[in-house]
Image (tube, helix red, strand yellow):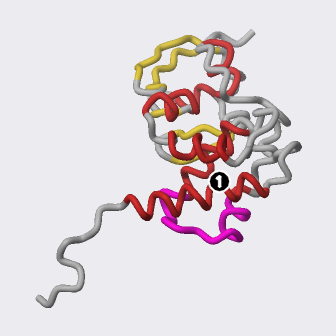
Amino acid sequence: MTAPQAIALQVNGERVEAHVLPRINLADFLREHLKLTGTHVGCEHGVCGACTVRVNGEIVRSCLMLAVQANEAVVETIEGLSDSGEISDLQEAFRARNALQCGYCTPAMLITAQELLKVEAEPDRDQIREHLSGNYCRCTGYQAIVDAVEATAKARKNKAPRNRDAGRAP
């Protein structure tokens, strides 16, 4: 039998230390050991996207990453992004446009959409669809999700501070 290994990581801004079996994946560690159940497990093959989290700023499929691989990493789950307010506008747009039904895919959709909006301030609908294509939704048909992401991008653009020196000659 394999002995548990010590890991230490930062999850949603809090340091976590634990002993885990080397075979436990990050999704199960988050759900079972830390009770962060917003990270869902769907296919367990990295295909459906339900287990999406951020590790060191990059989105990953937590069902494909072992918890021991996250040792000394910074992990952000939907709970952390929600509590920080980082995605509050996306959450509101999803609610307003009925972009969630059963809610199973919603946490990963929000994390993935936020990643897109961080790198592309105003993506077009095709870019949104492409970026979200690794996240399966069996209920909505995706239209409302794309609408919500597009609306959030436009709202963020309108809220962006204007450069007071724009248009002035040097």
Residue found at the far front of this picture: 96
The secondary structure that most of the magenta stretch takes on is helix
Q: Quadrant of residue 4?
A: top right
Task: List x then y, in percent, for residue 17.
Answer: 47, 14
Q: Quadrant of the N terminus?
A: top right
Give left or right: position of 81 versus 4: left
Task: List x then y, in percent, for residue 115.
Answer: 55, 52
Decide: is 167 above or below 153: below
Task: Classify mark 1: helix, strand or loop.
Answer: helix
In the image, residue 164 lies in the stretch drawn in magenta: no
Residue found at the far bottom of this picture: 169
Instruction: Please state the total of marks drawn on the protein image.
Output: 1
Decide: is 83 above or below 94: above
Residue found 73% across the figure and 33% down from its top? 63
* Extent of the magenta region: 117-131
Q: Quadrant of the C terminus?
A: bottom left
Residue found 62% across the figure and 56% down from its top? 149
Residue marked by disc 1: 148
Packing grade of label 1 (10 A; few <14, some 14-19, many >=20) is many
Residue found 14% across the figure and 90% down from its top? 169
Q: Quadrant of residue 86?
A: top left
Residue found at the far left of this picture: 170
Give left or right: position of 146 versus 117: right
Q: Quadrant of residue 34?
A: top right
Residues 35 and 25: in front is: 35
Task: List x then y, in percent, for residue 129.
Answer: 73, 63
Residues 46 and 107: in front is: 107
Give left or right: position of 161 versus 70: left
> Label 1 amino acid?
Ala
